[in-house]
Image (cartoon, coloured by chain):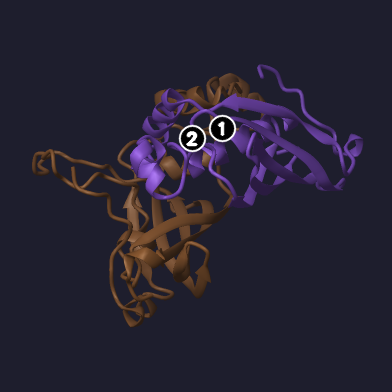
Amino acid sequence: MSEPSWGLWGRCEETKEYLNQVVGRSTGPDPVEQGSIRRWLEPKEFACDIHTDADVARAAGYDDLVAPASMVFTYGIAAYRKPGDAPAAIDDEPTQIQIPVVFDVPAPCDKSFATIIEVGFFEPLYPADVVTCTSKLVDIKRKELKVGKGAFLRQEDTYTKQTGEVVAVSYLDIFRFVAPRSGGDA
Amino acid sequence: MSHLEHLDAAAIKSGDELPAVSIPITLQRLVMEAGANRDLSLIHHDASVANATGAPAAFANTYFLMGMFERLIRQWAGPVARIRKIGPLRMLVFNSVGDTVAFKGNVLSVETAPGRVSVDIWAESGRGKTVTCKALVQLRG
């Protein structure tokens, strides 16, 4: 198995060209439905009937059973594989979650981690809704931390449903850096 | 939570505690979580990759933490409440396999008329406070 990638390498000037640009757009392959909600609730030991019983949800003021608000992230993730893709090989690079400011925006960094996330919720998600996530790079701040020299990249993700209604808007700060021992030039 | 109990903003005051939720982090839970929330990054289920980032073991992903904060809020505020905002969520320390993580919170402020409540929420384990966060909740839809 190959080592997992920690981001797309490039020069600082290239990173800046992406500022305030759409850097990614993904549509979840599966509509909102009860089975995926149940599987999401399960590892959190999260029991609340508005997420599993349409009658209770309606009594609470919703149109139908409603997905947990923070499940919007999951419904906006594109498929990892699709029919027709080349068969996987044992030494393929491992598949990771798609974070455009890490994997689609070049930067002089070979490591990364998320530091802060905040999300505002608007329209609820109901069964049959399909979510699209549109990502923009909205800020770059160069910084040196204990782990190395690099920059904070802020990604704005706008989650919309098929009607165009906004479900959520989130801001994710990713620190991309070069660890001192790897000898790169941030 | 199977009924429509809800909090009354007039009965809430700054400093009120949210009932804590505690959960052990096992590798099986992280694998279930990754499959369910679709964040399949190796740091969340492969110890050797997690170790390369300085973590002692595979660790919980952001979506799990967000979801657990939603559970904390939902169990306190009831099914009628609307969660308007979660964050900024700051990850301070890894929530790794072998840790038992408690999610806690208290009320920061209450706007009685619109029924909006701001809460300070956090996670803690034997490693101390691992995540800090805030949230905004509308008590009546």
Marks 2 and 1 in Cβ contact (< 8 Å):
yes
- For disc 2, the marked residue is A126
Tag 2 secondary structure: loop
Label 2 crowd bin: few (<14), some (14–19), many (20+), radius 10 Å: many
Q: CA distance from mark 2 to mark 1?
A: 8 Å
Q: Position of residue B136 (x, y in %)?
A: 71, 48
- How many numbered marks are there? 2
- The residue shown at (47%, 39%) is B56
Task: Say which chain tag 2 marks.
Answer: A
In the rendered view, would you say A73 is above or below A33? below
Q: Quadrant of the C terminus of chain A?
A: bottom left
Tag 1 secondary structure: loop
Q: Amino acid at mark 1?
A: Asp
Q: Which chain is purple?
A: B
- For disc 1, the marked residue is A63
Number of the label disc, if any, that sits on residue B95: none
Q: Which chain is brown?
A: A
| Residue B135 seen in this snapshot | yes
Q: Amino acid at mark 2?
A: Tyr
User: Which residue is more in the foreground, A132 or A185?
Assistant: A185
